[in-house]
Amino acid sequence: MSIRKVLIPVVAGLMISPALMAADLAGNSTARTVSNEFLGTAAAADIVAGDVLAVALGAEYAIGDIITLAFSGGALDGATVPTSVTVAAGALNGITLGLLSATADEAIYRVTDVDATGVTNTTVGVLADFAAADDLEFGAREIDAAGGVTVSFSAATDTGIPLDTGGGDLRSLEFIAAEDEYDVTVTIAFDQTVDVEQDREAFVAGDDDEGETTLVDLVFAAGQTAFVDQDIVWTGDFGWIIDDDDATAGIQPIAGVVTIAGCASIVVTATTISATCPAGAVSLILDPSVNLDALGDLVILPATAYSVTVTVNFTGFGGATGTVSFTLAGGEWVLNGFQALIPYMPYGTTISQVIYLANRGTQSGDVTVDWIDQNGNTGSLGVVAVLGATRTLSLGNIIRDALPATQRGSGRLALTVTANVPAADVQINSQYNVSGNRAFTLHEDNRP
């Protein structure tokens, strides 16, 4: 029996709950989460299956009424949409929906029959099961491009008047959520202080320093990658690490200077330390206290900032390989002495330099100078002078005379000047003269 409308329930005294007078898609459907990294490995034909999609109707439906399920992202395979949905009469009336059309963006159904033999003679509260788990299929690449799939419910009478408009947020659901599977954090940052009172050969406290990263692989019920390994690269100034094997490429540290437990393929250069590691937390421990040269002496430690790049390697659809990278600040080593960077200082036969350090403190200390020129050449002049207590020191001629001939004759240099005295006690003044014309140069320093 088909009917157009029922106004009065057949059971005397039974009222329809206001809570049922609203369409509810979200409360009866199940969202599914897939990995962004997994989606990134998809080929053109790869698909992701949706979960349960059902709607509790919140109005009286009649033959000819239209129900539309709209899907964002243009990812739906219309061929997987069920051609009909039937709910048998029971406590509520029965209803049959026939598929009118299905595209990548929507599925449109028409009410083809209402069975008014339900005990309460109403379609309010009827649960229409549009799809069971894994019935609906979506293009993985399209999901990746759209960032997920949201499904929304709407209805209208056969004459186009909006129907079943209640429900608010319950009328839609993020049906397929695309989320990042991997996350990396720096759980321990390098944080030592290089001590000028120990000639910058040791830390103020302790013998070593540790930097740790932690990789988290979120577990989704479906649609995730298979972790392979992680490649970690720490970047900083590692030029202080002594090479214990000149015959082998790269730097071969003395045992105990560089420790990365549980990892393989450890490679050390003057600017990077890299390793291939399993999942989870990975720790790099640097111990300068055992970094002794051929004479048994320690070497000068730099003030330097560290960064760390973690590249996660995994497999996704059909074993396809993929990667995702994270670059994070990894901490720093600071100096408790004075250090200044002069970013530009020219040299030549008609150019003279005026560089002064003024020390207002009661401690004296060595002054070292490092340089880099306009062509990327670098060098260290080592200790060039001693900055006395409560003294000024002229460094212009000292630095010029210590430079290699090429840089002294036509260099355009950046200079790093370090004094092994408290940073708060020292000020720097830097200028240059070109044929009698004086110019001041800006500088950066760590004076508090």
Image: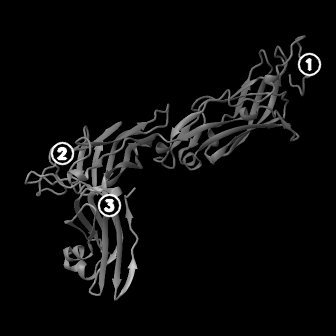
Query: Is residue 123 at least partly visible in the picture?
Result: no
Mark 1 closeness class: few <14, some 14–19, many ≥20 residues within 10 Å: few
Give, as a three-letter code, the residue at label 1: Ile
From the image, state whether disc 3 or disc 1 is nearer to you: 3
Task: Name the secondary structure under disc 1.
Answer: loop
Total labels: the figure holds: 3
Please state which of residues 298 and 183 is positioned toward the viewer in this rendering.
298
Q: Nearer the viewer, residue 273 or 382?
A: 382
Confirm or deny contact between disc 3 and disc 1 (CB under 8 A). Answer: no
Question: Residue 410, position in %: x, y?
Answer: 27, 82
Specify the farthest residue to the bottom: 435
| Mark 2 lies on residue | 289
Sequence-wise, the earlier of marks 3 and 1 is 1
Report the Cα–Cα distance between label 3 and label 2.
32 Å
Q: Earlier in the sequence, mark 2 or mark 1?
A: 1
For the residues marked 3 and 1, what is the alpha-carbon distance in whole angstroms? 97 Å
Check if mark 3's residue and mark 2's residue have beta carbons within 8 Å.
no
Kind of residue at disc 3: Arg
**Height in image: 284 above or below 98?**
below
Disc marking residue 8: 1
Estimate the x, y position of residue 390 in percent, counting from the top left. 28, 62
Residue at the disc numbered 3: 360
- Find residue 240 and report its horizontal and vertical position in percent: 21, 55
Residue at image position (79%, 28%) is 22
Figure quadrant of the C terminus: bottom left
Question: Which element is circle 3 on?
Answer: loop
Relative to 90, does residue 295 appear above or below in the rendering? below
Q: Compared to 344, does 36 lie above or below?
A: above
- Quadrant of residue 314 within the rendered picture: top left
Which quarter of the figure is the N terminus placed in? top right
The local secondary structure at tag 2 comes to: helix
